[in-house]
Amino acid sequence: MIEIVKTGLNALFVSIIASAIFAPIMIAILYKLNQVSGIKKSKIGGGDGDNTLFMKIMNVGRTNGTPNMGGVLIWLLVPALCLLLIPLTSVVKVFLLGFFLYGLWGFIDVVVFTNGMKNNEKMKAMQETFEWRLGKLLFSMLMNIGIMFLLYRTGVFGVISVFNVLIISVTPIILVLLGMVGQLAIYAAELTDGLDGLMIGIFSTINISLMVLLILQGKAEFIPILAIILGVQIIDLYFNIPPARFWNGGPGAMPLGFAMFFVAIVTDNLIPYIAMSSITWGIMASSAIQIISMKFFKRRVFRIAPIHHHFQAKGWPQTKVVMRFWLFTLITCILGIYLGLL
């Protein structure tokens, strides 16, 4: 285990150096290609309300013009470094395929539907609707179910153990359920990317906690990969803390959500991971509650959703929200490590 930790540290240092070189170049390219935020006043879901409150708490006068595809740093560098530094087992190949596909989906979403439609008020309103979000979720679920089937075909993923008490054999039905749960985890990661440093800080904490748990469990294969991801996260966080030099968007949030869920599944740590990432599930739940309530009851449950924006609307500074969510994640990660050792 000492040798695999050394290998992981080597990969971490290489990842930090590569990310530190790539990030400023990427930021310059995003500015040149005009891949920047441009939040404007629009209807919410095609209804009578608008996004005035959201524009206020996002301080668009200052933040409009910030590159919103910084997650390209994560999407491109992690697979590239893995191909260079990590032995390509069948499981690692499936992991890299899923990571790349989710980054690509996030990339298309931002380039086409966010930046490409920033001046189309009707399209922006449609993207806030229940039907649009449900359609995106179902498409991504199908993609994740396919990845789960590829993982199953590697032959190394046959059972799921719950605290070494309940052993569940993986069947096609279980794979579909895992694909659905996994996509919810990925969607939760994407929704968490709403404030400077929020998502990347949360997932850096989860990543470190997963590494600690795997070392304690003696499960070595994914430690170097998590180390590569952590190296990129460190540089990403450097540029993403307030005031952010870039926002990650789908190209970064979706692959990170996929990566943490995939590693949890392969290493039989699903329950610990759900505990570690519980803040992201809460963020997703707040958004779902708001959308459903607005769709069917025409009433708001939160002043604005997801819930981190609700706290902003109540007067919390952005940094206060972010740091308290980080602290909550640290507590749940300690709980996750404990559950993983039962």
Image (tube, grey):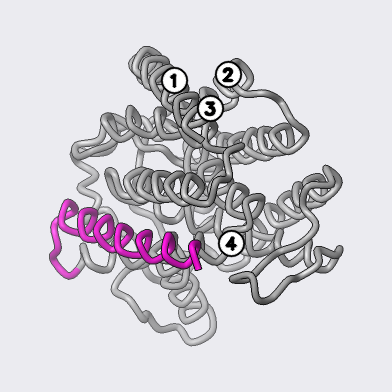
Q: Nearer the viewer, residue 75 or 136?
A: 75
Q: Earlier in the sequence, mark 2 or mark 3?
A: 3
Work out how far the residue at label 4 is from the one at label 1, CA to CA, in angstroms.
27 Å
CA gap, disc 2 and disc 4: 26 Å
Q: CA distance from mark 2 to mark 3?
A: 10 Å
Q: Which residue type does callout 3 highlight?
A: Val
In the figure, is residue 138 to the left or right of 321?
right
Q: Nearer the viewer, mark 4 or mark 3?
A: 4
Q: Earlier in the sequence, mark 2 or mark 4?
A: 2
Identify the amino acid type marked 4.
Answer: Leu
Q: Is residue 126 magenta?
A: no
Q: Position of residue 241 (x, y in %)?
A: 23, 38
- Quick one: SS at disc 1? helix
Comes first in the chain, label 4 or label 3 = 3
User: For this view, does 46 lie left or right of residue 306?
Assistant: right
Rendered view: 49 above or below 253: below
Residue lying at 47% horizontally and 50% vertically, measured from the top left: 216
Above or below, comparing residue 127 to residue 94 in the picture? below
Quadrant hosting residue 176: bottom right
Which stretch did the figure color magenta? 314-342
| Residue marked by disc 3 | 78
Q: CA distance from mark 1 to mark 2?
A: 10 Å
Q: Which residue is mark 2?
A: 85
Residue at 37% in and 67% down: 305
Q: Which residue is mark 1?
A: 10
